[in-house]
Amino acid sequence: MPNFKTLSLLSILFALVSCKEQVQFSDEDDFSINARSCSTSEDYFTQKVLPVIAQCSACHFDHDGSNELKIKNGDQYNNYLNMRNYILDGFEQVLLDKPSGDNDVFHTGGIRFDVQSDEYANLNEFIALVHTDEESSCDQLNQSASVDVNIESFDQTLRKSTLLFAGRLPTSVEYAKVVSASSLRRVLKDNVMKGENFEKFLMESANDRLLTNKFNGRTSVQGYYYPLRDVLYDENLGGDGSNETRDLIDLSLKQMPLRLINYVVKNDLPYSEVLTADYIIVNGYSGPGLMGDDFKGEVRQFDNWQKGDITKYRFIMDEYSETNFSLPDHVLSKTDEGKKRLPQAGLLTSPVFLYRYQSTDTGRNRARANQTLQMFLGVDLEGSIVRAQDPEELTNFTNPGDPASSCFGCHKVMDPIAGTFQSYGDEGEYLHKENGTTTLSNSYIREGKRGSNQSNPLRYHTKDTWYRDNLIPAGFESENMNKDEEFWYQSLQDQEKYVDATQWLANKIVKDERFLTGTVKFWYPVIFGTDPINAPVNTSDANYSERAQIYEYQQNLIKDLASDFRFRKLNLKDLLVDMVLSDQYRALDRKDINTNTEFVAGQGVLLTPEQLDRKIYAVTQLGWNNLSNSESNRKLLSDYYFYYGGIDSDEIEKRTSEITSLMGLVIERMTGEFSCRMLMEDFVLPQGERRLMRFVELSYVPQTQPENASGVYKVDINNIRHQIARLHFDILGEDLDDDDPEVDQTLALFTAVWNMRMNDENYSDNPSQNSEDPIYNEYCNTGGRQWDTSVWPYKNPEQTLKSWQAVIIYLMSDFKFIYR
């Protein structure tokens, strides 16, 4: 790698960078959350009772009996209400006696703690507070906690949000329009949340959760069942068999679920449609491959995304016959034109989603059920369940659906949902066995067909679509999917509305209260940079009280956001705006410096390589690339993508949240290499047309030049100061006066580099060419631009080009540039 600056410049630069006051976040540098003015039972429940009931959730997921306590996973507020109502209905003594074994009361789950324990005392205190609340002046059960932080201005929120959503800077007109929260909402929704970069934001963010971009360069669906080879090889469809065409087909397929989300949001449709959509989104590559001649769009066009249906599919009828991509009579779903199609339920039936989260003979769609719970209801099933630890139990209970098994609490929630995916095979195949009637495992079908097993009620019978030995019927929560008691074939409730179990499931999910909070949790890390914390469990932890307060704040924020999401008719744009208007996103720093609570503010989120690439272009109107401004050559999206924390949705699934030493080297390379080219591109333009350097010329110097110096000089410290102040605003968003101490600091760097170069005769007047001495190697990557070597900025005897380069390196290395 060529040395783009001298050793002396490096030492000065890093010395000065280390002096600059920067925003930093550490474990001890957090934000305080004020407690409420009065202690209610809900406060106490969050801080003291949640750890107690964490060990109860394995059994108390759902109970039909009126005298049983119900704990609904992933719903802290409803759990509080359930316990509160349970107490007010007269069962407070039962609540104490069962888990403690006191008064010889039997408890199926056994003794969980004794009467002398902290858990017992906490429950007893909670019961007292519930009764006190009925008579107290604390009438707000769900009063949000407040955050004691300084809040950024609306202009700052506009800039940060416009960079995030649209990958650009706000216009002067947009700045002028924003004077309040409501005007900020209008500008973000009407002006910012549109265009190609907003679509990129949506799809990148959604993929960080769905991870359907896993199949880079590989088939992302079970290709045998679709006429995809026609798109690749059929000359009538423009097929040429090339790797480029193959890659475009794969890219089009794997983007289908992300394009559905983009379609719903872009058209201001209710977000519930990402699950209830009875259509798919296709383009000129995926459309012909899933619809054949039913696709009416322009083939081999990548950007012509539109609604479509899967109308071509190869059904395996028996050992010896299959359909030629035509749908048999038992497929009931039809298009508006009356053509048969595979039934769709938004993301749940996307071929890519099903192929990404594959099943097995023993898994039986449970992985898909688990992902559905987590992604769309915000339920972390694995993180909230007590796993079986008793070796004897693990030996005696081989069926996790057995109510006597400690696995039952989890499987009672997961297995009904798994059953609703019964039309889809391990890799997403639709009813691909037994004359197009089932997807059950081959071993299960073979066992059932044996003569000695045909009368076994738990074995396969002809036309079964689900496992008889699963014990738990397909459905959702406590509701059976089928109208008949038999659950091993589909006899859907509301069959006039739904033709497949996944459609029934999708409609149940979007009507569940947790779909609102689940959607907030899905997009929460996109805006705030981290998932909400889990409820603290160990009351003996030193920071338990603080974390309990943070947990309470975040849960209240999620609940408030979900409530407004419902009020605004499930419009995702409004939800995202509500998030950026929240104190958590707009917090600048804490007011109370004597706090150890953990609160992640919107200022401390590391930009992804995609976001940093767009920010570089937004600020400079240039991309950091190899030879041209083409998207494929952007270095943060190609050469350095994985070095800078990128993901492949496969082996690397999590974004890097803290900068590493390797990422620091990428920043050093980017700023050093890109800054020189950016300045040359800017200075070659007339002053009024420049993007950044609008207030100075290369001839402007900070002080009188040394004797015998060549060049045309103009001592103009005022314009240099003003230019520096504008660079702070353009690059970092800092609105500084020309005499601000930050401007003084940056001016000191500019002057130090200029003096160093003016007083060392070894520096060339041509800062873009190589010198024989490596210390003075000043190669400048110009991105392939052919410069006129007879004019500035190629000739710079005034030595200001490299001085400005030091300033650009300094600012683009700043925390505020690489974080948001």
Image (cartoon, grey):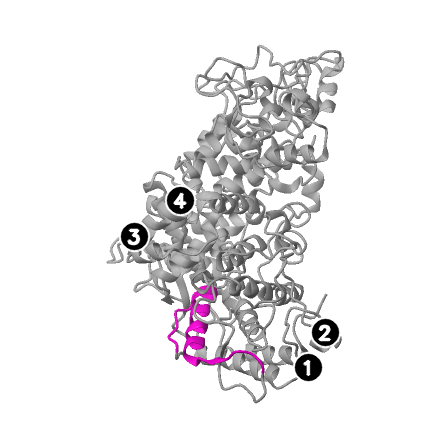
First in sequence, mark 3 or 1: give its number. Answer: 3
Identify the residue shown where x is 30% and y is 57%.
Answer: 176
Q: CA distance from mark 2 to mark 1?
A: 9 Å
The kind of secondary structure element at disc 2 is: loop
Q: CA distance from mark 2 to mark 3?
A: 55 Å
Q: Quadrant of the N terminus?
A: bottom right
* Of 646 and 653, the residue lying toward us: 646
The amino acid on which the numbered mark 1 sits, given as a three-letter code, is: Asn
Q: Which residue is mark 4?
A: 573
Whole-percent x and y of residue 174?
34, 54
Q: Which residue is mark 2?
A: 771
Q: Which residue is mark 1?
A: 762
First in sequence, mark 2 or 3: give its number. Answer: 3
Chain part drawn in magenta: 710-738
For marks 4 and 1, give the one nearer the viewer.
1
Q: Is residue 646 magenta?
A: no
The amino acid on which the numbered mark 3 sits, given as a three-letter code, is: Ser
Q: Is 114 drawn above or below residue 776 in the view shown? A: above
Q: CA distance from mark 4 to mark 1?
A: 57 Å
Q: CA distance from mark 3 to mark 1?
A: 56 Å
The kind of secondary structure element at disc 4 is: helix
For marks 4 and 2, give the one nearer the viewer.
2
First in sequence, mark 4 or 1: give its number. Answer: 4
Q: Are marks 2 and 1 in contact (CB under 8 Å)?
A: yes
* Of 486 and 695, the residue lying toward us: 695
Which numbered disc covers residue 670?
none
Q: Are marks 2 and 3 in contact (CB under 8 Å)?
A: no
